[in-house]
């Protein structure tokens, strides 16, 4: 009995006794400067479409996410404004995101720009690599309830692409159909015109975070996160069929509303 209790205590400690550490804003002043840089760029970008509807303006900006990201870098976007947490044997590392520009304060434009800070896979897995919850460094496997576009600002991002092969409400299974690598300046746009299921994570940037610029089709970060949370039942996937036909179940990530 004592041996059973000891084993149970070890399991509980492994599951609940490990802290999740998130990437963070390392320099608030530089983050504010980054917001100003993006604001000035978007003001200029909107000039050719100022007579268009808000929806058309939003679609135009989303389609130019790579160009906007490159302009940010040329104008001095401070990558050092964001940092990775220190890895250790008592923690799991997680990505986080921070608002750079919200359309609600700019004529109710249905668009929000966020900068994501990702710990690299290698850095995140140097401790607790076998822990079932050590997946927070990557996004979940998901599709989008709203339009989305992204561009890499620093480091390298890997995107795994999937297709839905079972759509039952209980047994929603996907399988991987491809993989893409995005370097600094690369980008992708999901305008919801066709099914798009993917997972994102960073590779090979050491202890420094990889940064990506994301654009979503709602006017505030709060509304973007609420949209993903509300649609999680049909836009998140954790049952993946391998090439051998075996379906593996991956633990879901934290609730998006908590960050």
Image (cartoon, rainbow, N blue to C red):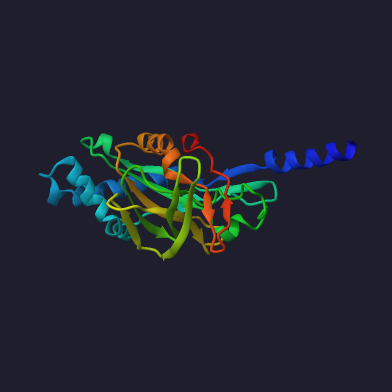
Would residue 181 appear left or right of 14 to someone viewing this image?
Answer: left
Q: Residue at x 57, y 49 (%)?
A: 250
- Image location (x, y in percent) of residue 244: 57, 63
The quadrant of the image that shows the N terminus is top right
Q: Residue at x 67, y 42 (%)?
A: 18
Residue 258 seen in the current view = yes
Would residue 241 appear left or right of 68 to someone viewing this image?
Answer: right
Q: Nearer the viewer, residue 98 or 190?
A: 190
Q: Residue at x 63, y 52 (%)?
A: 87
Q: Nearer the viewer, residue 214 or 85?
A: 214
Q: Residue at x 20, y 42 (%)?
A: 55
- Image location (x, y in percent) of residue 23: 52, 47
> Is 126 above or below relative to 221?
below
Residue 181 occupies which quadrant of the picture?
A: bottom left
Would residue 44 appear left or right of 135 to someone viewing this image?
Answer: left
Residue 13 occupies which quadrant of the picture?
A: top right
- Image location (x, y in percent) of residue 8: 79, 39
- Image location (x, y in percent) of residue 156: 45, 63
> Is 22 above or below relative to 79?
above
Q: Nearer the viewer, residue 174 or 61?
A: 174
Residue 157 seen in the current view = no
């Amino acid at each position: 009995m004592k041996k059973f209790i000891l084993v149970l205590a070890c399991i509980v400690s492994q599951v609940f006794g490990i802290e999740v550490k998130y990437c963070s804003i390392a320099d608030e002043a530089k983050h504010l400067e980054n917001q100003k840089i993006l604001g000035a760029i978007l003001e200029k970008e909107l000039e050719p479409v100022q007579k268009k509807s808000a929806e058309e303006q939003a679609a135009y900006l989303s389609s130019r996410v790579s160009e906007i990201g490159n302009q940010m870098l040329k104008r001095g976007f401070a990558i050092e404004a964001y940092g990775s947490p220190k890895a250790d044997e008592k923690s799991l590392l997680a990505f986080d995101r921070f608002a750079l520009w919200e359309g609600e304060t700019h004529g109710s434009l249905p668009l929000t720009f966020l900068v994501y800070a990702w710990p690299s896979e290698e850095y995140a897995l140097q401790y607790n690599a076998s822990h079932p919850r050590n997946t927070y460094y990557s996004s979940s496997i998901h599709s989008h309830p709203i339009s989305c576009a992204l561009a890499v600002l620093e480091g390298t991002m890997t995107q795994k692409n999937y297709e839905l092969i079972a759509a039952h409400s209980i047994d929603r299974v996907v399988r991987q159909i491809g993989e893409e690598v995005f370097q600094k300046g690369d980008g992708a746009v999901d305008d919801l015109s066709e099914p798009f299921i993917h997972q994102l994570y960073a590779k090979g940037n050491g202890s420094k975070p990889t940064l990506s610029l994301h654009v979503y089709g709602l006017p505030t970060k709060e509304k973007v996160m609420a949209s993903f949370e509300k649609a999680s039942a049909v836009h998140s996937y954790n049952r993946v069929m391998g090439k051998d036909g075996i379906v593996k179940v991956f633990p879901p990530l934290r609730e998006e509303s908590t960050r």
